[in-house]
């Protein structure tokens, strides 16, 4: 009996997420109260680790986790996970990037309203017995200009809500094409300086990395309108807090709203002394709904990774999102099947492949599909764990070279994927596509011949001379073996009168049966394939 894989949940997770993992057949342990020493001592027993933001998954933790296959972060950021070290060891890192998108956007709007109308300050004064109505007069949002720096999912939702409040919205994001701004009905700033120059409110929605640390500094504040209000619900450190403090003191910034800090938790941040700063303790993702989504989404991703399936939210494999995902991901299974098929019908080892993408998918970054081909070729065929993180490295270690080719159109199909190699008999190619609303995988070329067959667990591919009576001979022999043919497809060439037959079978065929079939029916050869 196969031993169950074990998942350690190190921090509080929505009960629904824990139950999901148990229903998937994993043993789940809660280590919420474990000391650092206990954690390091026990982590070696687990295939998966789930954390939130408090647990630091360092190189030392990863080294101690000898069995780790996946690390899940129940939230958006992955600042507390050493992704580079995990990738080096073939560990998939997943998160829940959509879990708090709506919640963070709503908190941004709430913070903007709070600093526009001085709500926290007026509330505190009244609680302390002071009626200071005139002191806390604010400004309206309607007809004001909101500048958004970073137009990702959260930035877009903020823009959508701000437009509902009748605000003018301008956004800066060099990685979003102009067409997307037009689709969203937003003004696009070619340079961030324009956002600084025209905005009454500025909100930051950038990821935290070496390029964005201290992004909004003294120079940035100098370019802003006098009396601007600034909001940060993204990541601490993106706004230089000392520069913001100077802007508050000079009056350049009338008010600020801050939810995130360079060091957390904190109760003595430099900004807390200013009455015109609205501060919350990193509440951007703190709603019941967001915590539920984070828990269930990360559990789903961890389960996929542990079951050897593609986890869409993995952060250390080629990223696929939005429109690209809609076009590419239905073909990922096709690519895995093609790789698996190719390695089973090739004569001898494969040392090079070329993957050709024809049609619509050729317009996109197809690296994830190429990873899928290699996954199909190498999984369960080489020693050790093979997954979408380490498969390219494993291919390189084995001297397998990989080339991608793109073609603008695919003859006969909207999209076509062809994997080509050379074996001892010359060039060998297999092709496939995904058809219909359910994106059903189909093999459409095998052994350099056109076929049309749905992949199945048990298959046989036969090569023979295209002469009358061959289909009957093969069918009769299969009947003698007691093997039912579920599907048959024949491809042939008129020039040399060669044919390829693909069969899907209800039960597997032994090598002895295949040898007898080839010999008795006068076939050139045959290959059993297990998918």
Image (cartoon, rainbow, N blue to C red):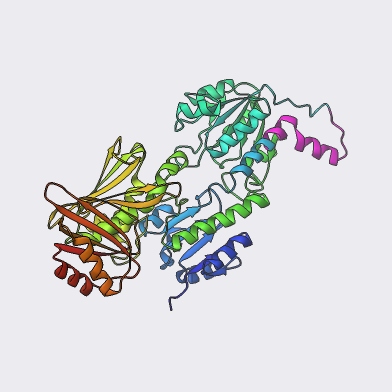
Of residue 63 and residue 426, the one placed in the foreground of this image is 426
Residue 252 is situated, as x and y percent measured from the top left of the image, at 63, 24
- Asked whether residue 397 appears in the rendered view, the answer is yes
* The furthest residue to the bottom: 1
Residue 113 is situated, as x and y percent measured from the top left of the image, at 71, 33
Q: Quadrant of residue 221?
A: top right
Q: What secondary structure predominates along the stretch shown in magenta?
A: helix
86 to the left or right of 355: right
Of residue 8 and residue 119, the one placed in the foreground of this image is 8
**Where 335 sits versus 322, above or below?**
below
Magenta residues span: 111-133
Q: Is residue 113 magenta?
A: yes
Q: Quadrant of residue 137?
A: top right
Q: Is residue 79 magenta?
A: no
- Asked whether residue 245 appears in the rendered view, the answer is no
290 to the left or right of 127: left
Q: Residue at the location (20% across, 66% down)?
A: 473
Which quadrant of the rendered structure holds the C terminus? bottom left
Of residue 38 and residue 312, the one placed in the foreground of this image is 312
Residue 438 is situated, as x and y percent measured from the top left of the image, at 45, 50
**Where 401 sits versus 21, above or below?**
above
Which quadrant of the rendered structure holds the N terminus? bottom left
**Where 299 sits versus 120, above or below?**
below
Mark count: 0
């Amino acid at each position: 009996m196969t031993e169950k894989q074990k998942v350690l949940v190190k921090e509080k997770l929505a009960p629904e997420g824990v139950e999901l993992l148990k229903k998937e057949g994993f043993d789940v342990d809660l280590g919420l109260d474990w000391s650092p020493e206990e954690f390091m001592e026990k982590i070696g027993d687990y295939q998966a680790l789930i954390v939130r933001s408090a647990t630091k998954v360092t190189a030392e933790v990863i080294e101690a986790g000898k069995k780790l296959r996946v690390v899940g972060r129940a939230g958006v950021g992955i600042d507390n996970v050493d992704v580079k070290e995990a990738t080096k060891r073939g560990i998939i890192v997943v998160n829940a990037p959509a879990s708090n998108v709506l919640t963070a956007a709503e908190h941004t709007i709430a913070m903007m309203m709070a600093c526009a109308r001085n709500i926290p300050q007026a509330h505190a004064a009244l609680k302390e017995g002071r009626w200071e109505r005139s002191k806390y007069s604010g400004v309206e949002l309607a007809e004001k200009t909101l500048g958004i720096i970073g137009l990702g999912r959260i930035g877009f939702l903020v823009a959508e809500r701000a437009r509902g409040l009748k605000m003018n919205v301008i956004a800066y994001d060099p990685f979003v094409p102009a067409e997307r701004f037009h689709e969203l009905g937003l003004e696009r700033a070619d340079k961030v300086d324009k956002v600084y120059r025209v905005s009454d409110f500025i909100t930051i929605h950038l990821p935290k990395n070496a390029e964005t640390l201290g992004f909004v500094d003294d120079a940035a504040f100098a370019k802003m309108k006098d009396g601007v209000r600034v909001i940060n619900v993204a990541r601490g450190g993106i706004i230089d807090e000392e520069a913001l403090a100077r802007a508050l003191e000079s009056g350049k910034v009338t008010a600020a709203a801050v939810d995130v800090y360079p060091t957390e938790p904190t109760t003595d941040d430099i900004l807390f002394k200013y009455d015109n700063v609205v501060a919350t303790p990193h509440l951007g993702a703190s709603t019941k709904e967001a915590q539920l989504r984070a828990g269930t989404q990360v559990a789903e991703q961890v389960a996929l990774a542990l079951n050897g399936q593609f986890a869409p939210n993995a952060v250390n494999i080629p990223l696929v999102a939005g429109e690209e995902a809609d076009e590419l991901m239905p073909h990922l299974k096709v690519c895995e099947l093609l790789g698996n098929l190719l390695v089973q019908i090739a004569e001898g080892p494969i040392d090079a492949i070329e993957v050709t993408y024809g049609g619509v998918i050729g317009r996109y970054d197809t690296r994830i599909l190429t990873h899928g081909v290699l996954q199909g070729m190498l999984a369960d065929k080489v020693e050790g764990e093979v997954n979408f993180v380490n498969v390219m490295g494993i291919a390189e270690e084995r001297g397998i070279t990989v080339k991608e080719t793109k073609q603008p159109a695919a003859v006969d199909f909207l999209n076509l994927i062809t994997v080509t190699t050379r074996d001892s008999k010359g060039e060998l190619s297999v092709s496939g596509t995904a058809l219909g609303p359910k994106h059903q995988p189909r093999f459409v070329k095998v052994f350099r011949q056109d076929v049309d067959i749905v992949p199945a667990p048990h298959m046989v591919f036969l090569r023979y001379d295209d002469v009358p009576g061959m289909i009957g001979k093969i069918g009769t022999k299969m009947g003698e073996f007691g093997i039912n043919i579920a599907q048959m497809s024949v491809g042939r060439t008129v020039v040399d009168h060669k044919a390829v037959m693909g069969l899907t079978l209800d039960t597997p065929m032994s090598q002895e049966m295949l040898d007898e079939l080839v010999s008795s029916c006068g076939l050139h050869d045959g290959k059993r394939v297990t998918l």
